[in-house]
Image (cartoon, rainbow, N blue to C red):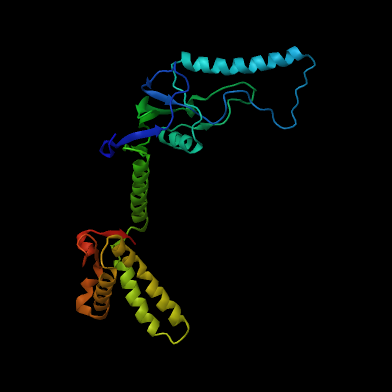
Amino acid sequence: KSAGESFLMNGYALNTGRAAQGMPLKVSPAKIACLDFNLQKTKMQLGVQVLVSDPKGLERIHQRESDMTKERIQKLLKAGAIAVRRVRKEDMRHVAKATGATLVSTFADMEGEETFEPSFLGSADKVVEERIADDAVIMIKGTKTSGAFSLVLRGANDYMLDEMDRALHDALSIVKRTLESNTVVAGGGDVESALSVYLEYLATTLGSQEQLAIAEFAESLLIIPKVLAVNAAKDATDLVAKLRAYHHTAQTRADKKHLSSMGLDLSEGKIRNNLEAGVIEPA
């Protein structure tokens, strides 16, 4: 579909379908068990041996193993459960956290029986399998904790989706960093230019080899506004020179301190107050 048909879902989306076709497409309300082990035969621990003197005995063991797996799957089908297999560890942890379930790594109890505590179950308003493009996706909607949301991206092709994924990841990372630092600064090459001007002046006050290192660092900071201007097909040399002049004035004249928020306007190819224009980034 088109990118405009992407949506935000209250819950968790698993990029996989049901384990068997006989399972229902929807369970509502749903109880959720997170099993982090194989329902097929269990491997013996190291050092455990099974001695079989009769070849028919070996056949019986194999038969019992495949019957156990069949039995378990049939029980799930009869109970009207949706089972999803080969779920990634990371997804499993997220589902457990969102639904209040506990990850279970074995059914065995102290008596050697197989049991499952009801307290290990998580809950959700509904679990439903929906088709998105060619894939079946399991949606866990209305999870117990409100912190779980999934973004389902739609796009014309894989390249477009990859681009959208990257752009969203960047945007979310910026929001995260803003929340962490709790302060913002003007963007568009503003901070880098201000630091460059400040450090260049600082370098001239030092009478040691440090002067060269600091001057070089001041110069290297200008790469950011230069690259921004070049990417926008503007005259980088002209814009960076103007930007530095503004910041020099802001730092040397008390009545011009408001110029410290000047950064690049890349649509118009000029210098503007980026704080007022709303171009900001996390400190």
Residue, far bottom? 207
Q: Residue 252 at what x, y percent from top left? A: 26, 80
Figure check: 167 above or below 110: below
Instruction: Please give the count of numbered marks on the rendered protein.
Output: 0
Q: Nearer the viewer, residue 27 or 262?
A: 262
Residue positioned 34% across, 72% down in the render: 195
The image quarter in which residue 112 lies: top right
Q: Nearer the viewer, residue 138 or 105?
A: 138
Question: Would you say residue 127 is visible in this rendering?
Answer: no
The image quarter in which residue 219 lies: bottom left
The image quarter in which residue 184 lies: bottom left
Residue, far right? 53
Q: Is residue 200 left or right of residue 84?
A: left
Figure check: 6 above or below 137: below
Q: Residue 177 at what x, y percent from top left? A: 37, 55
Q: Is residue 68 left or right of residue 171?
A: right
Residue positioned 44% across, 19% down in the render: 81
Q: Residue 118 at what x, y percent from top left? A: 49, 24
Quadrant of image for the N terminus: top left
Quadrant of image for the C terminus: bottom left
Question: Would you say residue 2 is visible in this rendering?
Answer: yes
Q: Is residue 54 left or right of residue 63?
A: right
Q: Nearer the viewer, residue 145 or 159?
A: 159
Residue positioned 37% across, 21% down in the render: 26
Q: Residue 43 at what x, y percent from top left? A: 66, 27
